[in-house]
Image: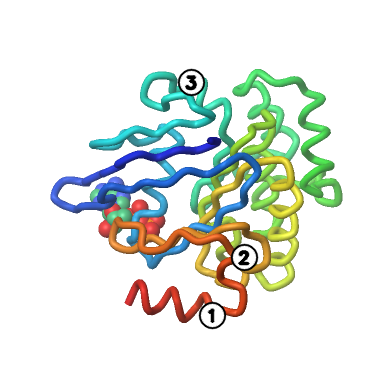
Amino acid sequence: MSISLQNISKNYGSQKALDNINFSIEKGQIVGFLGPNGAGKSTTMKIINGYLNPDAGEVQVNNVSVAENPMSTKAMIGYLPEHNPLYLDMYIKEYLLFCAKVHKVSKASVKIIIDKVGLKPEISKRIKELSKGYRQRVGLAAAMLHNPEVLILDEPTTGLDPNQLVEIRNLIKEVGKDKTVLFSTHIMQEVEAICDRVIILNKGKIVADRLMDELKGKNLEEMFRSLTN
Ligand code: ADP
């Protein structure tokens, strides 16, 4: 399995964020991660990345324990956090070269990723001069520079205009062809358009885990509302 979570629980003080979460994602799947705000999606993603430790349970990435080998599992994951933190004063290439150094990958990989995510038309700009759609492309480029097998994308399309939204969605679909992708979103059509599977979280518990093929002809939005309202 590319990603495996077993009996994961997490509290922030007295706030229960995750309550015994279990799921596995096989190699190559694109999984939409849905849930109301506060359901625990970001917490789950941070735990898979090794940025947060769970209070209980075990996470494995490519059958390697995140708790025991955090450096090796981090190297297998590309993570685009919510709100996409970037160094705004840097030029695109300057920033990606910096990320390449951090990941110890060659300068050549920066050129390849710039082509892949379609940053060429804006390449002479500083990050602060870019539209939100292009900033998301920079975030995706940074997440994919080291060619990770697993992509964890926390609300990658939130705040984009309809054209940017379709462009980034297509990009996720394209790069997802040879990766395992877990991404969170509030847009049901997005899940229907690009996912193989949907996992719905509510109040720290999984309330649905279904293949999209099983949901053909069903209304995902209605299902979401009945499970989370
Ligand atoms: P989602 O990504 O689905 O919106 P989160 O994982 O961000 O959900 O949050 C799950 C719950 O944990 C919420 O009740 C949230 O308020 C709480 N929470 C998240 N981060 C923290 C934190 N750093 N400290 C305290 N509570 C937190």
The residue singled out by tag 2 in the image is 213
Residue at screen point 58% across, 56% down: 156
Residue 87, quarter of the rendered image: top right
Q: Residue at x 75, y 62 (%)?
A: 167
Which picture quadrant has residue 112?
Answer: top right
Q: Earlier in the sequence, mark 2 or mark 1?
A: 2
Three-letter amino acid code of the residue under disc 2: Asp
Image vertical order of residue 44 relative to residue 208, above or below: above
Instruction: State the mark number for residue 219.
Output: 1
Q: Can you tell which mark lies on residue 71?
A: 3
Q: Is residue 215 left or right of residue 46?
A: right
CA distance separating discs 2 and 1: 13 Å
Scheme of image coloration: rainbow
79 or 60: nearer the eye? 60
Q: Residues within 10 Å of mark 1 (few under 14, many from 20)?
A: few
Residue appearing at x 46%, y 35% in the figure: 49
The answer for how far apart the CA atoms under marks 3 and 2 are is: 36 Å
Disc 3 from disc 1: Cα separation: 41 Å
